[in-house]
Each structure stands twice: as C-alpha cells, then as structure tokens.
Image (cartoon, rainbow, N blue to C red):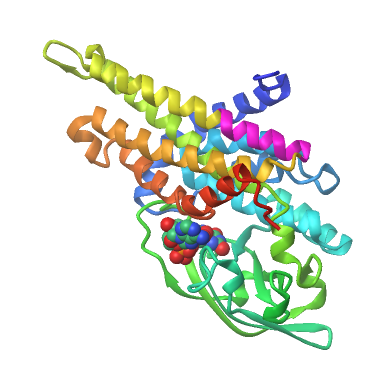
C-alpha cells in the first residue's frame, strides 16, 4: 500500500508551496483585514495554469485529478483559505460543465475558465433550502428555446467578481424529486445582489444573496440533462476541496504554534520547553496528519471511481474541518494574549476554519452520510 505522493504530485505541491511563500503569505493578512479580493494572486495562479488544474487538457487545462486538487488546495489554504476557496469554487463549476455540459458549451466556456478569463460561482443554496437543497423555490419555465428563471440564491460566494454562476432551478414537479432540478450557466451581471453577508471569515472572497425575476436563459445554457442536476451533482467529488482547505489551515496553525513556542520565553525558557505546550503541539501534529490522510484517501477513491468515495469525502470533511478549528484554537492559546489580536494570523485561521464546518454542507449532515455508509443504508 502506497502512502506517498508520486514524484509529479510532490513537484506540484512544491511548486505551489513556493508560490504561496513568495506571493501569498506576505500579503494574506493585509488582504484579509482590508477585505480585498486577491485578484493579483489569482491572476498569478492563472499564469501558471493552476486555474485550469482539473480542466481537461483538450480545453487548455492541466487535466489533473482529485488528489492534485487536494494537494493544491491544501497548499493555497495554508497561505490563505479564501484563495483555496476561490480556486475550488471556480473549478467546481468547470467540472460540472465538463462532466455534464454539451460539447458546444464545453468548447465555449472551458478554455476561458481554464485561463480564469471567465470566473465561476455556485448558486445552489437558498434561504429555505440550506442542507435540504431539494426544497429550493427557484423555478425555471420553458418558453420556446428559452427558460424563464425566477427566484433567489443565498450565499453565492464570489458572485461580485465572478462572470458566470451555475444556477440550480426546479424544472419539474415535486413528485419527480430529486429528478426535478436543472442547472443553468448564467452571466452574473443578470443577478441582482440584494444582500452582502457580513461574515466573520473568508473576508477576501465574500458571499452574497442574489435575486432574479424573469431571467431569460437560452436552452443551450442548461448544463446536463433536464431535471437531473442534483443527481448528477451527487456523482462528483469536488467536495474533497473542503477537507483539503481545512488541512491547510490546521497545518498553518501548527507551524505558527511551533514557531511561537520556540521564540516566546517565560520563566527563563522558551514556552516550547513546557511539557504541556509540547503535548499540545503533538496533538495538533496528529490532527494534521490524520486529516490529510483521510482527505487524500477520499481524493484517491474519487480518482479511482471507488463507490466509497462519497462517504470517505464526508468522513474527511468532518474530521479535517474540526481538526482545523481545534488546531486554530490551540494555536491561539499557545500565542497567549497576542493570539487574540489581528497582529498574528492565528485568529484568521480560527475564523476561516469555523466556516468550513458549515460550508459544503454542515458536518452533522456529512455525519449522516458516514452513518448511512457504516450501516449500509442505500443513498439513492
Ligand atoms: C460563508 C459561506 C459561503 C457559502 N458559499 C456558498 C456558495 O458559494 N454557493 C452555495 O450554493 N452555497 C454556499 N454556502 C451555503 C452552505 O453550503 C450552506 O450554508 C450549508 O449547506 C447549510 O445550509 P444552512 O446554512 O441553511 O444550514 P441549515 O440547513 O439550516 O442547517 C443548520 C443546522 O441544522 C442541522 N441540520 C440540518 N439538516 C440536518 C440533517 N439532515 N441532519 C442533522 N442535522 C441537520 C445541522 O446541525 C446544521 O448545522 C455558503 C455558506 C456560507 C456560510
């Protein structure tokens, strides 16, 4: 059994790690505290082909799989979770288009998405359809060669900077659920932002509520089979980016705690000499490794088409995101009073980590998936 990344995967990890050290870490706190979109960082990633990481080479991408996605998102999120999030959300939209979209739509959109000239956002959740996506109220009604779409979407991360949104709407009767939802690729300029959320984390890539009435969408902008969008979405495993983001934060928190424990002296010795601090660091290190192993196992399962990939992704999501919260909290404690200030990055790790236990579906809902798997309850 192999527990090592391949040479190519290690090379990719090292490439992104060097990029983060030189281009992202130095500006992360400033971007976060000023709520500034990391445009320069994302454009630099586009120059390196990273914004097309999982897009097929035929469309100008790098054609990588879920393991490479997890590796890259961990590295970026160790520098700044918002950047890992922006990349993952964008690639998540591209992967739905690539897997389920028509040849014409793929050819039209994917090369531009790979270059990051067209940036994608996800418009799935609604006020009354959070964990229960099938409860969505947005509707699309066919008129000739167009669909007329009305409703709202809540939590559309990056919608102000994105060019297109993958928007889900009911196109069939309730009796047909879950085969009554379709996905459409719509220009974000057709969506009206009616609320910007004052979230406590993910500051640089914020999230908003949007509304739209009688939005006319050409039939050829439907992504996938009519009515099958939620079912098709369930077959993708891009959600492995959530635990990968968490591994990045958990690792950054550990590194910050180790550095501070070395430099801070109390009672005439570095605080890292206290056994209590050492045990805390040891526990944090164990959380990082366990979270990464679960994440890479899930990513590898997704790449192999293993039917357990969904449950493994949920297990990784729960473990890694809670590990990130615990590590960020421990890192703040190791920093003492300054850990509670914005002069050190550990408070940002805590705020960003806390988002991940809810984003991508609350951990309790992912626990349901794991429980169904261990109890052998069919999911479809
Ligand atoms: C900052 C941020 C960014 C986001 N970005 C996006 C985005 O880009 N696009 C998008 O479409 N969505 C996005 N989301 C939405 C996110 O996916 C939802 O918030 C999430 O799915 C949960 O929905 P909810 O917030 O309505 O919580 P609810 O569904 O109301 O759940 C609240 C709590 O109820 C419990 N619960 C609910 N259902 C169950 C169940 N079946 N079993 C056990 N417990 C349960 C859980 O404890 C859960 O934490 C974002 C959310 C946030 C906060």
Residue 100: % across, % down: 80, 59
Residue 334: % across, % down: 25, 27
Q: Is residue 26 left or right of residue 2?
A: left
Q: Is residue 302 magenta?
A: yes
Q: Is residue 71 shown to the viewer in this render?
A: no
Residue located 60% across and 42% down the image:
374
Instruction: Give above or below for 50 relative to 226.
Output: above
- Residue sitting nearer the eye, 166 or 281: 281
Instruction: Give above or below for 377 relative to 284.
Output: below
Which SS does the magenta portion mostly show?
Answer: helix
Q: Which residues are magenta?
A: 293-305
Q: Is residue 110 magenta?
A: no
Q: Is residue 315 left or right of residue 340?
A: right
Instruction: Give above or below for 174 relative to 7.
Output: below
Outermost residue to the right: 103
Could you tell me which quadrant the C terminus lies in? bottom right
Residue located 49% across and 34% down the image:
248
Marker count (numbered): 0
- Residue sitting nearer the eye, 197 or 242: 242
Residue 69: % across, % down: 65, 38
Residue 315: % across, % down: 55, 40
Residue located 28% across and 23% down the image:
260
Residue located 79% across and 54% down the image:
98
Q: Is residue 205 left or right of residue 313?
A: left
Q: Is residue 320 left or right of residue 335?
A: right
- Residue sitting nearer the eye, 367 or 151: 367
Could you tell me which quadrant the N terminus lies in? top right
Instruction: Give above or below for 211 relative to 22.
Output: below
Outermost residue to the left: 267
Q: Is residue 131 shown to the viewer in this render?
A: yes
């Amino acid at each position: 059994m192999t527990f090592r990344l391949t040479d190519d995967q290690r090379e990719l990890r090292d490439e992104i790690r060097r990029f983060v050290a030189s281009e992202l870490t130095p500006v992360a706190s400033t971007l976060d505290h000023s709520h500034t979109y990391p445009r320069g960082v994302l454009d630099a990633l586009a120059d390196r082909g990273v914004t097309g990481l999982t897009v097929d080479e035929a469309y100008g991408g790098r054609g990588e799989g879920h393991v490479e996605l997890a590796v890259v998102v961990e590295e970026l999120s160790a520098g700044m979770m918002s950047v890992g999030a922006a990349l993952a959300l964008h690639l998540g939209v591209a992967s739905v288009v690539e897997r389920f979209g028509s040849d014409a739509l793929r050819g039209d959109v994917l090369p531009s998405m790979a270059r990051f000239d067209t940036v994608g956002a996800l418009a799935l959740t609604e006020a009354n359809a959070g964990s229960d996506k099938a409860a969505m109220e947005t509707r699309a009604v066919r008129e000739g060669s167009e669909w007329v779409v009305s409703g709202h979407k809540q939590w559309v991360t990056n919608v102000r900077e994105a060019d297109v949104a993958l928007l889900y709407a009911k196109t069939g009767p309730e009796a047909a659920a879950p085969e009554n939802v379709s996905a459409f690729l719509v220009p974000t300029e057709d969506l009206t932002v009616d609320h910007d959320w004052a979230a406590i984390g993910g500051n640089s890539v914020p999230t908003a509520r949007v509304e739209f009435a009688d939005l006319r969408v050409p039939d050829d902008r439907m992504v996938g089979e009519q009515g099958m969008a939620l079912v098709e979405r369930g077959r993708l495993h891009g959600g492995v980016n959530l635990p990968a983001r968490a591994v990045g934060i958990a690792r950054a928190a550990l590194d910050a705690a180790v550095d501070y424990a070395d430099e801070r002296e109390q009672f005439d010795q570095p605080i890292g000499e206290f056994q209590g601090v050492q045990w805390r660091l040891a526990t944090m290190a164990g959380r990082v490794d366990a979270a990464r192993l679960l994440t890479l196992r899930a990513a590898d399962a997704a790449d192999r088409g293993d039917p357990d990939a969904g449950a493994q992704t949920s297990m990784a999501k729960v473990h890694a995101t809670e590990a990130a919260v615990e590590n960020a909290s421990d890192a703040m404690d190791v920093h003492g009073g300054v850990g509670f200030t914005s002069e050190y990055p550990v408070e940002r790790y805590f705020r960003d980590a806390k988002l991940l236990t809810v984003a991508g579906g609350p951990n309790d809902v992912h626990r349901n998936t794991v429980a169904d798997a261990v109890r052998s309850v069919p999911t479809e």
